[in-house]
Structure formats: structure tokens, C-alpha cells
Amino acid sequence: MKLYGYFRSSATYRVRIALNLKGLPWEASLVDLRPPVNAQHSPQFRALNPEGLIPVLSEGANTLTQSLAIIEYLDETHPEPPLLPRSPLARAEVRSLAQVVACDIHPLNNSRVLNYLRSPLGHDERAVNAWYAHWIALGFTALEQRAQHLSGDGRHLYGTSVTLADVCLVPQMYNAHRFHCDVEPYPLLRAICAHLESLPAFARAAPQVQPDAPA
Ligand SMILES: N[C@@H](CCC(=O)N[C@@H](CS)C(=O)NCC(=O)O)C(=O)O
């Protein structure tokens, strides 16, 4: 399998974690998002994903986009260890937690949105950072409250084993740190991430240890 991504892309980070959890071999193909390269806009990459977004997973002749769709595909084709619980209610809870990150925080804060705020809308870095921190705070406040009821051990967002919700949380916490957001108000989320980041599958997926990360 080939994963098109970039070390700092948190959506790619989710897929790296899932591939590692499943023990699947994968090869990285760099899509450098930094200007002026903007490889996501190259005709070659747009042929793979007309949205111009990473990650993209290719397997043989098949190409998949959207990190949650990719991860659920991996979970269905390689069921162990499962990333979704068995019961429909529990599955819905885990997907709901994952979607707080993937649908309600991340899309508002990805680089094309931040760039649009800068130009053409004309906002300065202070305003852009305030925007970023605002959506992190709204989402993390809700997740912290929900984790108090749903975490089974203070080490996982849901229950007592790694789920899709954890796979989404850790990269979003990485982003929050990267943009200097205040994460003090979320002690449970921080404890969960500290535990998860110590697991080999998460540690090997971390941005700073990817081959395209600066030394
Ligand atoms: N919903 C998509 C989001 C993908 C996404 O926003 N990817 C970012 C990197 S994390 C990207 O490619 N950004 C390029 C850009 O903003 O131009 C997913 O989960 O895969």
C-alpha cells in the first residue's frame, strides 16, 4: 500500500496510526504541502484526488481518499485489532467522537481555510491564530466532557481499548500544540494522549519521526 501524505498533515497521521495498529506494511509518498511547492495542486496529484487533499491511499489499481473512509476500509479488510466496537450503539458513540475531530474541528482549521482567511479575506496572523484556537477550544471542551463519561480507564477516549476516536484525537492534540493552543483545560484528553503516544503504533506514526520531517 502507498500512502500519499506529508509528515505534518494530521489527517495523514490518522491513517499512519491505523496502518501501524493493523501491522500493515506501507510505503510513504511525499506530497509537500509547503508553498511554493504546493504539491497537492499538481496535475499528477489532482489526478489521484481532485480535491487536492491528503491523505490518499493506493492499493493496486485502487485509490482511496478521506481519512475516515480509508481507516474504516482498513478496519473492514483487516479486522484485528478492531477500531470500532461490536455493538451498534458503541460504534455510533466512537464514530461520533471521531467526527467531533474530523468533521467539526479539523475542516475549519486546515491550511486552505487558514490561507483563505489570510488572503483574500485579509486577516492577520493574530486573527488566524484566534480562529484556530477557538475551534480547538469548542471541540476539546465537548470531548473532555464526553470522555469523562465514555472513557473506561482514563487512557482511551472510549472504553478501554484503542478506537477510531483515539486515532483522531492524538493528531488533533498534536495540531493544538503546534498552534500553541491552551490545552490546560483538558486534563483527561491530555492523559489519554500521553498514554496513546507511548504505544508503538502511535509513536511510529508521529510527525517528527517521519522521513520527510526536518532533522
Ligand atoms: N476530510 C479530509 C481532510 C483532508 C485534509 O484537510 N488534508 C489536509 C492536510 S491535514 C490537506 O491536504 N491540506 C491541503 C490544503 O489545505 O491545501 C480527510 O479526513 O482526509
Image (cartoon, grey):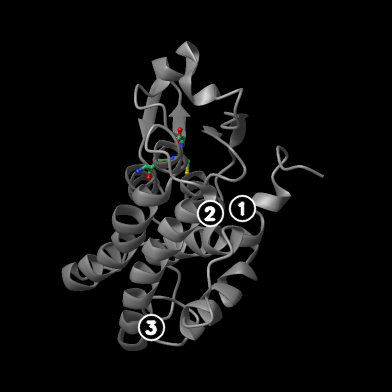
Marks 2 and 1 close (CB-CB < 8 Å) = yes
Identified by mark 1, the residue type is Ala
Q: Earlier in the sequence, mark 2 or mark 3?
A: 2
Disc 1 is placed on an element classified as loop
Q: Quadrant of the C terminus?
A: top right
The image shows residue 35 at horizontal and vertical percentages of: 59, 28
Q: Which residue is mark 1?
A: 205
Residue under label 3:
151
Q: Position of residue 108 (x, y in %)?
A: 35, 50
| In this view, 116 is above or below 189 | above
Q: Residue at x 36, y 58 (%)?
A: 105
| Residue at 40% in and 70% down | 137
- The residue closer to the viewer here, 24 or 56, is 56
Q: Earlier in the sequence, mark 3 or mark 1?
A: 3
- Disc 2/disc 1 C-alpha distance (Å): 5 Å
Q: Kindly identify the amino acid type of the residue bearing the numbered disc 3.
A: Ser
Q: Residues within 10 Å of mark 1 (few under 14, many from 20)?
A: many
* Residue 75 visible within the image: no
Whole-number angstrom distance, CA of label 2 to CA of label 3: 20 Å
Residue type beneath disc 2 = Ile
Seen from the viewer's position, the closer of residues 19 and 206 is 206
- Marks 3 & 1, CB-CB < 8 Å contact: no
For mark 3, does the 10 Å Cα neighbourhood hold few (<14), some (14 to 19), or many (20 or more) residues?
some
Which numbered marker is on residue 17?
Answer: 2
Asked whether mark 3 and ligand 1 are closer than 8 Å, the reply comes as no
Q: Residue at x 36, y 77 (%)?
A: 141
- Residue at the left extreme of this rendering: 88
Q: Which quadrant contains ligand 1? A: top left
Residue 157 in the image: x percent, y percent? 41, 75
Query: Callout 3: helix, strand or loop?
Result: loop
x%, y% of residue 182?
53, 73
Crowding around mark 2 (Cα neighbors within 10 Å: few <14, some 14 to 19, many 20+) is: many
